Amino acid sequence: MTISIMNERTQVLLRSLPAMEIMLSDPRNVSHLKSVNRDLLKNMCSSVLDEFRRSILEGERISFDEDELFGELDRRILAVARPSLVPVVNGTGVVVHTNLGRSCLAPEAASVVDLVSRRYDTLEYDLEAGERGHRNSHVEGLLCCLTGAEAAVVVNNNAGAVLLCLAALGSGKSAMVSRGELVEIGGSFRIPDIMAFSGVRLVEVGATNRTHLRDYERALEYDTSMVMKVHPSNFRILGFHSEVSREELARLSHERDLIFMEDLGSGILVDLEPLGLAGEPTVAQCLEAGVDLVTFSGDKLLGGPQIGGIVGRKALVDRIRTHPLLRALRCDKMTLAAFEATLRIYLRGEWRKIPTLDMLARSPEAIRERCDRLAAALASVVASDGQVSVTEVQDAVGGGAFPATDMLGYAVAVRVGSCSAGRLQERLRACATPVIAGARDDTLLIHGRTLLADDDERVVRAFTLLVEEGWS
Ligand SMILES: *Cc1c(COP(=O)(O)O)cnc(C)c1O
């Protein structure tokens, strides 16, 4: 479109847009300069003006006032200036909630992170020798103590740990995996893809629901170097099902000079059977059963930071230590500090101090009492606008472990006449500390199991705000 055929109204509208410098020096921008620097503010003013100019020229905008212009600028500044990775209240009852950051660190682990991140430290420094040390050394001895392993290394996460083990020990050869374990784990981690990427040829063994020792024996090929066992994560085969025990696979592997590795997924360090969580072995139990190398996550049931642990035979771990991928997958100092502090809690036998394990260990009675207290506080906030009660719910472990195990828990149930449960969830997500809640039968549910120490107050504050602002 050229100026000559532009109608008069369009020209008037265009002329009424402020010049960039005028817009920039408007008093309404003073507060914006606390959120974004001057250059960025200038770019944003200019892009908002461009946008308005374009919509006028294309006839989409037939009127204009300055409030609209500054409203758009406000929205854009808020979108970049508002913190994005923020704490939330987990009211879902899913303990290892992958979308909500999986595990919460124990306070003493978090304070070591704070300390180490602000100061110089011994990350790769050997104080005794006064020379270069190894970052892995801070946790290797602890992992060996807690799992009975001969050696250990850690990397960025368990996906990286599996990739590294396969690349360092099996590249150019083949590895056998049961068809029942060729799973995809949330976030598109697929065993066949990881194997292909690390240069290991996959040999599938048995059938999806049943795999026997003879299947492994028959599948052996000239270049087979590994037997890999994979935790099936959320996937469970029920009914007509069989798999080969670790002991049998270890015997076969060692007779045939193969490496027996297991991707354990969650990786627990203490037996959770006393908590009613049976059927998942500890890392130590896997090694005892004859697995040569076990990999696991640090931030699932272990309750530490995101990390990938590799523990097992020294000769194998030593081969991994020198692989170039280790450098690419190494952990940063904050992670290592948090992991070391978490392992020390286990060393002292104080695992109840690990929030993830504490949440799993909470008794239904204790959760009920807590929900009763929170419900009483919420009832006085909600008053006659709705009903607050306490109801029985099923909580979940999460993180792919114990998928078939439901844990009895309690939740505070909230119904507000003028506001659906879905809308309540949405409003709670928009609070300063967002509250992530569940819902059932158009009733909002705040599960007590996953609430941390002062979360009750946060929930009460969130509801107080909703009452003040009006429910809808
Ligand atoms: C969770 C999981 C992974 C991925 O671990 P990350 O620490 O998230 O990388 C791999 N394998 C299994 C069996 C898992 O459960």
Image (cartoon, rainbow, N blue to C red):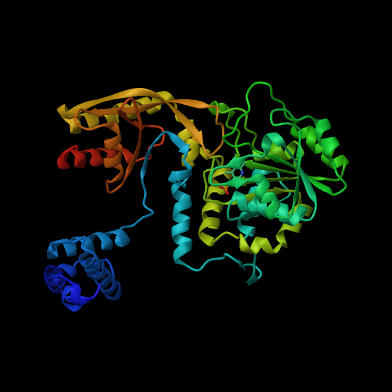
Which corner quadrant holds the N terminus? bottom left
Vertical position of residue 149 compared to residue 411: above or below: below
Q: Position of residue 223 (x, y in %)?
A: 85, 49
Vertical position of residue 374 compared to residue 65: above or below: above
Residue 397 lies left or right of residue 451; in this view the side is right
Q: Is residue 141 visible?
A: no
Find residue 257 and report its image quarter.
Answer: top right
Q: Looking at the image, which residue is at 72% across and 57% down?
A: 320
Q: Residue furthest front?
A: 5
Residue 158 lies left or right of residue 166; in this view the side is left
Which residue is more in the foreground, 207 or 230? 207
Which residue is more in the foreground, 281 or 204? 204
Q: Position of residue 68 (x, y in %)?
A: 16, 61
Q: Position of residue 108 (x, y in %)?
A: 46, 50
Which corner quadrant holds the C terminus? top left
Residue 18 lies left or right of residue 371; in this view the side is left
Which residue is more in the foreground, 296 or 230? 230
Q: Is residue 4 visible?
A: yes
Vertical position of residue 404 compared to residue 341: above or below: above
Q: Looking at the image, which residue is at 47% across and 57% down?
A: 113
Quadrant observed for ligand 1 in the rendered image: top right
Q: Position of residue 152 (x, y in %)?
A: 68, 52
